[in-house]
Image (cartoon, grey):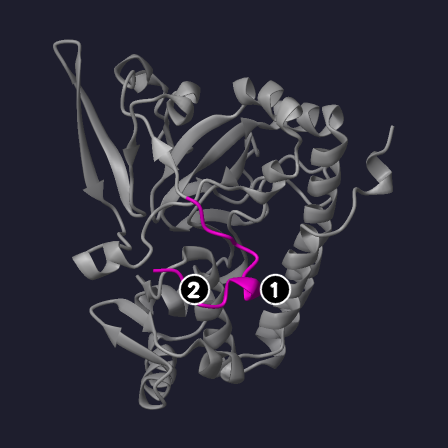
């Protein structure tokens, strides 16, 4: 069940159906570092299967036949209540949504559907950015990794944008670790093909240009947030951001994971989570946070949540950028 405040969210929900037919011929295309590939025709075929977030394909070939099983990787739908309350995938990436249908049809042969597994590392620092990822659902985090192993999240990317491209367009290796924090599906595009797509479509060029600017603003705001705001404020912001992108009130967020993203000790997260529990903002049980009162979390959050949310909302309402006009 979707929340009653759709006007506040820049992430409108819609279902995605992924076809299981014909995957046997594509099994060899699976690449552990870059997602589980699904044939390009799969999202447009008649025989389809609706997936819930957290489910991934476990595929094996036996005697030429495909044996496929859906496994839970990091499921948002561990019980019937979750599945009844909005655990369907979204099929919308907002950068692609800006492209007119006739131009989008010409893009399809370069868009490779993939399933992304929670915890999957797409890039480590210094690795070449060979593909750009356009999430349909789930969330990818860019994480700064220190020499002593400590980490802190720099930004999160969902279906509002793309991961694997630099803000300038001229950097071809990863500066951060790119890791799937919430499972889902999306497209990946070879880096050179992505730039060709940008050159071929004024609308897509405009959307990507604005997204690159949003990335810069998110990075700068994240620096200020980590330096100036309390763990309490930053945890509230992180929960709200995840809440926006998953379209469900039940979030699979363990304290160890939250501590890693915020760059603090687990005990600090535990203390704040208990405080949020005591005021009725959340419930916390077995590694899942249930958002009970998002308004209370907004009151607890720092200003960065509203600022970034506003930047993302503007991304999809502004006219095409003059930089991309012929």
Q: Which quadrant would residue 214 be assigned to in this image?
A: bottom right
Q: Are marks 1 and 2 in contact (CB under 8 Å)?
A: no
Q: Position of residue 66 (x, y in %)?
A: 19, 18
Q: Position of residue 143 (x, y in %)?
A: 50, 55
**Residue 235 belongs to the span the image colors magenta:** no
- Classified by dominant secondary structure, the portion drawn in magenta counts as loop
Query: Judging from the image, what secondary structure is the residue with disc 2 in?
Result: helix
Q: Residue at x 86, y 33 (%)?
A: 325
Q: Which quadrant would residue 96 be assigned to in this image?
A: top right
Residue 269 vs 175, above or below: the answer is below
Q: Residues within 10 Å of mark 2 (few under 14, many from 20)?
A: some
Residue 74 as seen in the image, left or right of residue 312: left
- How many marks on residues? 2
Query: Judging from the image, what secondary structure is the residue with disc 1 in?
Result: helix
Q: Residues within 10 Å of mark 1 (few under 14, many from 20)?
A: some
Q: Nearer the viewer, residue 90 or 133?
A: 90
Residue extent of the magenta highlight:
1-14
Instruction: Give whichever of discs 1 and 2 has the lower sequence position.
Output: 2
Q: Residue at x 44, y 76 (%)?
A: 294
Q: Position of residue 49 (x, y in %)?
A: 27, 32
Q: Nearer the viewer, residue 262 or 86?
A: 86
Q: Quadrant of the N terminus?
A: bottom left
Which residue extends farthest left? 63
Q: Residue at x 57, y 49 (%)?
A: 160
Pointer 2 residue: 243
Q: Which quadrant would residue 98 be assigned to in this image?
A: top right
Q: What's the distance in space between the residues labelled 1 and 2, CA to CA?
A: 12 Å
Let me know if residue 79 appears in the view.
Answer: no
Pointer 1 residue: 309
**Residue 5 belongs to the span the image colors magenta:** yes
Let me know if residue 76 appears in the view.
Answer: yes
Q: Quadrant of the C terminus?
A: top right
């Amino acid at each position: 069940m979707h929340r009653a405040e759709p006007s506040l969210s820049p992430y409108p929900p819609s279902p995605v159906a992924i076809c299981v037919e014909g995957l046997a011929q594509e099994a060899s295309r699976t690449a552990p570092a870059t997602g589980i590939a699904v044939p390009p025709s799969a999202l447009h075929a008649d025989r389809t299967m609706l997936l819930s977030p957290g489910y991934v394909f476990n595929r094996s070939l036996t005697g030429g036949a495909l044996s496929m099983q859906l496994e839970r990787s990091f499921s948002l739908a561990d019980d019937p209540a979750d599945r009844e309350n909005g655990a369907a995938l979204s099929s919308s990436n907002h950068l692609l949504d800006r492209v007119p249908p006739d131009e989008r049809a010409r893009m399809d042969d370069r868009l490779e559907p993939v399933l992304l597994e929670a915890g999957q590392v797409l890039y480590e620092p210094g690795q070449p950015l060979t593909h750009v990822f356009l999430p349909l659902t789930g969330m990818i985090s860019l994480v700064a990794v220190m020499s002593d192993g400590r980490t802190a999240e720099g930004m999160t990317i969902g279906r509002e944008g793309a991961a694997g491209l630099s803000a300038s367009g001229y950097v071809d290796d990863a500066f951060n670790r790119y890791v799937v924090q919430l499972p889902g599906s999306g497209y990946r595009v070879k880096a050179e093909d992505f730039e060709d797509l940008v050159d071929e479509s004024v609308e897509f060029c405009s959307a990507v240009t604005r997204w690159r600017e949003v990335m810069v603003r998110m990075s700068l705001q994240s620096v200020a947030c980590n330096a100036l705001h309390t763990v309490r404020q930053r945890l509230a912001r992180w929960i709200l951001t995840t809440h926006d992108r998953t379209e469900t009130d039940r979030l699979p967020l363990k304290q160890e994971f939250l501590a890693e993203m915020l760059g603090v000790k687990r005990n600090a997260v535990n203390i704040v989570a208990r405080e949020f529990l005591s005021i009725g903002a959340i419930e916390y049980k077995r590694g899942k946070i249930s958002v009970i009162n998002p308004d209370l979390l907004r009151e607890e959050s720092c200003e960065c949540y509203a600022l970034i949310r506003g930047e993302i909302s503007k991304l999809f309402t502004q006219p095409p950028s003059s930089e991309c006009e012929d």
